[in-house]
Image (cartoon, helix red, strand yellow):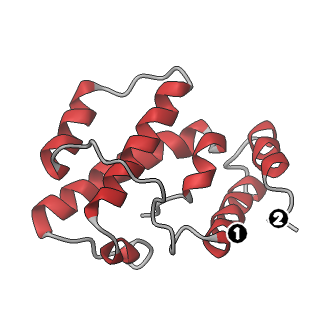
Amino acid sequence: MRLWHIELLPVLPKQQLIGQLRECVAMALRIHRDGCINNILINRMRDYPIEHFKAYCNAVIAEIERRGYNVSGITKRKLIEYLGDLDAEQTEIFSEWHNKRYLRQCLYNLQEKYDCGGIRQEEWEVIENKFKEELQ
């Protein structure tokens, strides 16, 4: 499980973006069922109010819809069932966690996916062009 850095959402390849929504639903279910998350890559969510995660889920949905894809009503209903009302206004989402260091970690993870053939060259070039400085 991973929450891609919030700044990456606009350039994530479709596969990773759609996968992120599935991860959000799975994380929401765990929070609903178990009261918390227990995964080394996302345990830092515990350091923030749930509104940060709700706002993150909203950002993922908004990006998917901005690209012209549909998010099913079932998926939205699951998130609401598991998290409650999704109307969470956050100006900074996971501000201490989603910092420049975490952005670089996510970028290197995406770069590895590209190097191994999991991301197409044109998708990687979009990421690379936006984050040239961070990738140096």
Q: Position of residue 118 (x, y in %)?
A: 67, 49
The tag on residue 70 is none
Q: Residue at x 41, y 51 (%)?
A: 56
Under circle 1, the secondary element is: helix
Q: Residues within 10 Å of mark 1 (few under 14, many from 20)?
A: some
Classify residue 12 by image quadrant: top right
Q: Position of residue 125 (x, y in %)?
A: 82, 44
Q: Describe residue 78's horizontal placement relative to residue 136 as left or right.
A: left
Kindly check if marks 2 and 1 are in contact, taking CB atoms under 8 A apart as contact.
yes
Q: Amino acid at mark 2?
A: Leu
Q: Disc 2 marks which residue?
A: 135
At which x and y percent is residue 94? 45, 66
Q: Is residue 115 above or below residue 101?
A: above
- Tell me which numbered mark, 2 or 1, is placed earlier along the sequence: 1
Front in this rendered view, residue 132 or 108:
132
- Where does label 1 land, which residue? 104
Which residue is at a point 47% across and 60% down the rendered structure image? 3
